[in-house]
Image (tube, helix red, strand yellow):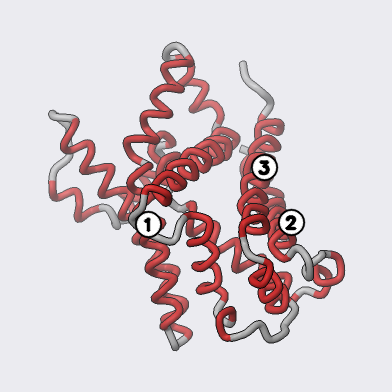
Amino acid sequence: MGLHPVFLYIGSFCASATFVYFLFEKMEVVLKKEIKIAFSRLLKNLDAGEEFENWVVTFGSFFDRIMGENHFSWKRFKRSCIASYLSLLVCFAILFSINPNTYYEKFSEGPIYLWVISFLVGGLAVNIFPDYLSYIQTRFFIKLFSKARSSFNKALIPILDIIATYLIFIIFTMSMVFIFMPGNDLNFKMYFNVLKPNFILGIIKRPEILLFLLTTFFTSTWLYLFLLSSALIKYGKFFTKNLDIDNKPFHSLGIVSMATVFIIYLIAAPFVLGK
């Protein structure tokens, strides 16, 4: 016996929206006043200077200030670990609300504390390093984006970012299983199948793997929400009239991002709850 799916879905939305808002509120707190002034001008279609004319590059500089300037540093690795576990909890809330019966079955297989331990150890084993590499990889693609000139290349780079993030997780996880679990069914030929549709569908159908895969997309999801929310504020008069963009531009981004998450959940509700 478990909670009603509607309550689980609402709880999942609250966890997702709160996490998203926290990310942008953190930006509001840590960034310098001159940066916030320049970005508020950018959102209002005013000249913000050459440093802020490319939104993706701007996000890259924000990301570095929050996660750490040096890619290979203890500071960035520590913050990466914290972000990994926070996003792991949020992804669990989302998947649990979509398919609670699968997880109830897992819970019934043994004491709950063993499942919690496996959850934490699993995050340590297959998320900490892939997520850390994913942050560095996304930062690399942000740099590529800043140098791209054609619209085709700019559209292609986010797709490559998604593929690269997926490959980092899958190859790392398969390698961990191959090395530390003797007697498994893995072989080197399987590495060439990871981009085949049947393999990807198999991953999606296994919630215990999908959970850890989704957390690897933390940086990419944050970037796309940043870009989408910025565009909605920049081109939507409703937002410029009702939000304090002048004094709290990133707080405003957080509110718009929460609204975006709400709309996504609202659209998905009939498909998730109607099963």
Q: Do the residues labelled 3 and 1 touch (CB within 8 Å)?
A: no
According to the picture, the residue beneath numbered tag 1 turns out to be 165
Label located before the other in sequence (1 or 2)? 1
From what the image shows, is residue 91 above or below residue 73? Answer: above
Q: Residue at x 55, y 64 (%)?
A: 62
Residue 42 sits above or below residue 256 on the image: below
Q: Nearer the viewer, residue 124 or 238?
A: 124
Q: Name the residue under label 2.
A: 255
107 or 272, which lies in front? Answer: 107
Percent position (x, y) of residue 197?
Answer: 34, 55
- Quarter of the image holding residue 115? top left
Q: As rendered, which of 14 and 247 lies closer to the eye? A: 247
Mark 3 or mark 2, whichever is nearer to me: 2
**Residue under the point 18% across and 30% down:** 181
Q: Report helix, strand or loop for mark 1.
A: helix
Where 148 sits versus 257, above or below?
Answer: below
Asked if disc 3 and disc 2 are in contact, CB closer than 8 Å, the reply is no
Amino acid at dot 2: Ile
Q: How many marks?
A: 3
Q: What x and y, as percent, mark residue 215? A: 46, 46
Quarter of the figure that contains the N terminus: top right
Residue 31 relative to residue 142: left or right: right
> Helix, strand, or loop for circle 2?
helix
| Spot occupied by residue 225 in the image (x, y as percentages of width and height) | 60, 61
Residue that label 3 marks: 13
Residue drawn at point x = 42 percent, y = 29 percent? 120
Residue type, mark 1 in image: Thr
62 vs 118: above or below = below
Question: Residue 228: in sight, yes or no?
Answer: yes
How packed mark 3 is, by other alpha carbons closer than 10 Å (few <14, some 14-19, many 20 or more), is many
Is residue 214 visible in the rendered image? The answer is no
Is 216 positioned to the left or the right of 167 in the image? Answer: right
